[in-house]
Amino acid sequence: MKSRLFAAFAVVVFFVIVTTVHAQRRYELIVEGTDVVSQAERTSQRLVIIDSRGDVTEYTRDPRFDPEDGGFLAYFSTGARQILRWPASDRGKMQIARFVDGRPTAFRRSRMTIRSLDAGGGFEGIGVPGAANIESRDPFRLVPAAHAGHALNAAAGGRLTIASAADVDGQAWLITPLDHGYYRIHSGRQGRRRSLSGPPDGPPRLERTARDVSQLWQLLPIHNRPGYYAFACAGAGPAAHVLTADASGVVSLQPFVHSSSQMWVLRPWAGVLPPAFSEYRFASRELRPNPPLEPALVEFVNSHSKELWVLVADRRNPAESIRLRISAGQSEKISLARDAGGTLVEIYEYGLPGLTQRDEFATPLPPAVRYDVSVYELALQSITIDRTVPGGKLENVNYSPKSVGWFELAPGPELGSGPLQVFQTAAGQKNPGAVRRIDPTEWQPDLKPTDPVQSLLDEFKKRQEKLP
């Protein structure tokens, strides 16, 4: 009987599902007429609010509290004991209610106006607060996750220190979006005449603003800590090197390993705008792209023993991200665009009205990383057996995606066509907590597995059901 049972599984049918996935949406929540700005990140099943102080509240989709007209989607936070109704149109204002004695109080209209950061308000889907209106937003205080109550501080001579948070100009940082997902970062101590730099010959520091790629930064969202970012220096090479504050408070550039010492939260500056920012003004920027590169044809290979779920996130256009379900022993080829780099032209103005002078910087940009990859394996979670039936009856098999790891695809011409061993690459990063979060119900509602072991269990269940 055993031999016949396993022979039935000598031929296993594999399949790969390739679909475009809508990445989580990002928003600003603005109280009109004030400087109060919060952030929101939303999927169909989850809503995260990061308030102006950097505090994070998570909500889970709960249709019980949807209004009958379908104009709002309800999310519930068990920790905050609060219900938020989010406009189905992604515009307007939320409705809020407390959850008291097992029922919601009357819903009231929020003062906050919702503004999407994925439709022109943010850059590369990163959604830095205030990025859409760089001249009217306040600076930020950069707070390291590993040093509570402290902030990044610009000291004498352009040095960087970690100091107790205080309303001093050296802790006000203006984050200016440029193009292609790049930013300049200026301190209130010296304004835009100095830029945060990650030079190859020493620790990060403030240097005179110049046509230097080491003065350009990218903000990488930390997927398992909403509201936190890593600051990656564009001049540090293809492998991400990020701003790091070690246990003793020494600031340096280090390879990105998702350590808490590399995570920062941006808290809006509550003080007066430092006068140094008005002395040297950012006027405009223009990206002049290099000739385009042909797309790369990358084969995602699953040599693992389990089915893999692979999210290929497009940082340039999150709506074009791709999700793959690859059965064990199978592969899938997809065409991926490659960034060619270019030249970033910035113009700054200074002087009195009528006597305005300009500085122009033309900085060569290296090709940027366009894609990152989150990998999950479909793992068996539990098996339910009915022991009331003689010999036992297999009732149910539960399984769920388990994170393996996250990695970036090489930028520009370094991303070549050919095979990519997905599981080995992801597992080798040793960072399962760094993956982008997914909603399993959007991958396949019934979550039917496709690996041979699970197929065997399903077939065994069917045979058990046919027994008299």
Image: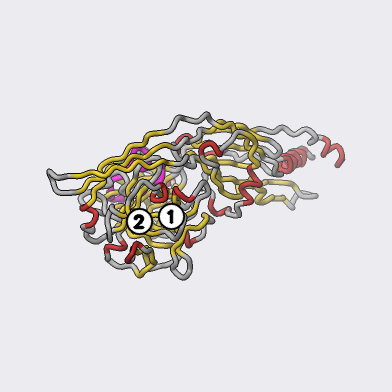
Residue linked to disc 1: 199
Q: Earlier in the sequence, mark 1 or mark 2?
A: 1
Residue sitting at 73 percent across and 40 percent down?
452
Q: Nearer the viewer, residue 32 or 235?
A: 235
Quarter containing the N terminus: top right
Instruction: Please tell me which residue lies in front, 107 or 319.
Output: 319
Q: Which residues are magenta?
A: 107-128
User: As shown in the figure, which amino acid type bears the numbered disc 1?
Assistant: Pro
Q: Which residue bears the numbered disc 2?
A: 207
For the question of whether residue 262 can be seen, the reply is: yes
* Place of residue 303 in the rendered image (x, y in percent of width and height, measured from the top left): 70, 41
Residue drawn 22% across and 45% down? 349
Q: Position of residue 451 (x, y in %)?
A: 70, 40
Say if mark 1 contacts mark 2, CB within 8 Å: yes
Query: Could one spot residue 116 in this view of the protein?
Result: no
**Badge 2: residue crowd in 10 Å (few <14, some 14–19, many ≥20):** some
- The residue positioned 28% from the left and 47% from the top of the image is 134
User: Is the C terminus in the top left, top right, bottom left or bottom right quadrant?
Assistant: top right
